[in-house]
Image: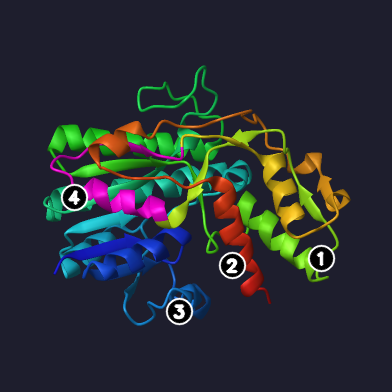
Amino acid sequence: MKTAIITGVSGQDGLYLAKFLLEKNYKVVGTLRSYRRENTENFEYLGIENQVTIEELDLLDMANVIRIIQKYNPDEIYNLAGQSSVGLSFEQPLGTFSFNTTAVNNLLESIRLFSPSTKLYQASSSEMYGRVKSMPITLKTPMHPISPYGVSKMASYFMITTYRESYELFVCNGVLFNHESFLRSDNFFVKKVINNAVKIKNKKLDKLVVGNLNVKRDFGYAPKYIEAMWQMLQSDKPDDFIICSGKSTLLRDIVEYVFDNLKLDKNLIIENTDFFRPNEIDEIYGDNSKAVEVLDWKYDYYFYDILDILIDEELRNAK
């Protein structure tokens, strides 16, 4: 039986990955910065409560990282922990950069020194690329991050490639574009729109307040994206991959689709310039052909079908 450690296991990706690995007969160890009851409710939602071994772990404490690695001697580590909000990174730039880079460095050094056979997956982000001159984005696209979050992910990305090339470790970057599910945090756009729209339908909210809707993003389905994470670590050699749908969708179209689906008045959609991000990117989408060809990863979801799934799930679980 293989052992996998998932950092940030209570997040959307960590939860779906834990379920996926359990179904493949892994021993799954999930780490959280601090254990609280609310951190485990979503395990019950996926039917995996009591199946994941939970450990408290502060990734900024290298001694603690070493302790966990030596305790479990994992075959694979999936680093999904971090400050992942672009908007919040403008409010907390130093904290975002410090955590997102130091955590990766501590994992890499602990593996290098104490468990060099352990394979590491690093959750990277399309935000590294920022304002690009051509689409779609590939791994050869020059990086020009325009948010503190993007800068932190770029630094982590190159730490992974440096350790792979310098120390011959099996470490990989997965450059994931936006990927959604019911378990997405409320501060992410699609989840916020659907959650608030359902509240409006149920008379618990009177309007939806959003930022700039005239931008396009590449959206996908999280339960499918986590399969690619696992596939990367099953490859014969370590490499980096872009995981995306390969198509962009206008945010305004998403909001209007959700409101049409729920038969809501679109006059309740309020665009507030206070929610606009500095240095907004008009459009971004990626090229997933390398993952399709090398990993045999298959992605054939239509995003509006995903929206239907997410709306139905939100309605069923509305409180």
- Give the magenta part as a residue range: 224-245
* Alpha carbons under labels 2 and 4: distance apart: 32 Å
Mark toward the start of the polypeptide (2 vs 4): 4
Secondary structure of residue under mark 4: loop
Q: Nearer the viewer, mark 1 or mark 2?
A: 2
Q: Which amino acid does label 1 sit on?
A: Leu
Seen at 49% across and 24% down, the residue is 144
Note whether 102 is above or below 204 in the view shown.
above
Note whether 73 is above or below 190 in the view shown.
below
Task: Name the residue beneath numbered marker 1.
Answer: 205
Q: Where is residue 195 drawn, in percent x and y? A: 68, 62
Q: How many neighbours does mark 1 have within 10 angstroms: few (below 14), some (14-19), or many (20 or more)?
A: few
Seen at 27% across and 35% down, the residue is 293
* Alpha carbons under labels 1 and 2: distance apart: 19 Å
Q: What residue type is labelled 2?
A: Glu
Q: From the viewer's perspective, is 306 left or right of 157?
A: right
Confirm whether the magenta stretch covers residue 119.
no
Task: Name the residue beneath numbered marker 2.
Answer: 313
Q: From the viewer's perspective, is 76 left or right of 254?
A: left
Asked if labels 4 and 2 touch by Cβ distance under 8 angstroms, the answer is no
Q: Can residue 303 be seen in this view?
A: yes
Task: Name the residue beneath numbered marker 4.
Answer: 234
Rendered image quadrant of residue 290: top left
Image quarter where the N terminus lies is bottom left
Q: Which amino acid does label 3 sit on?
A: Glu
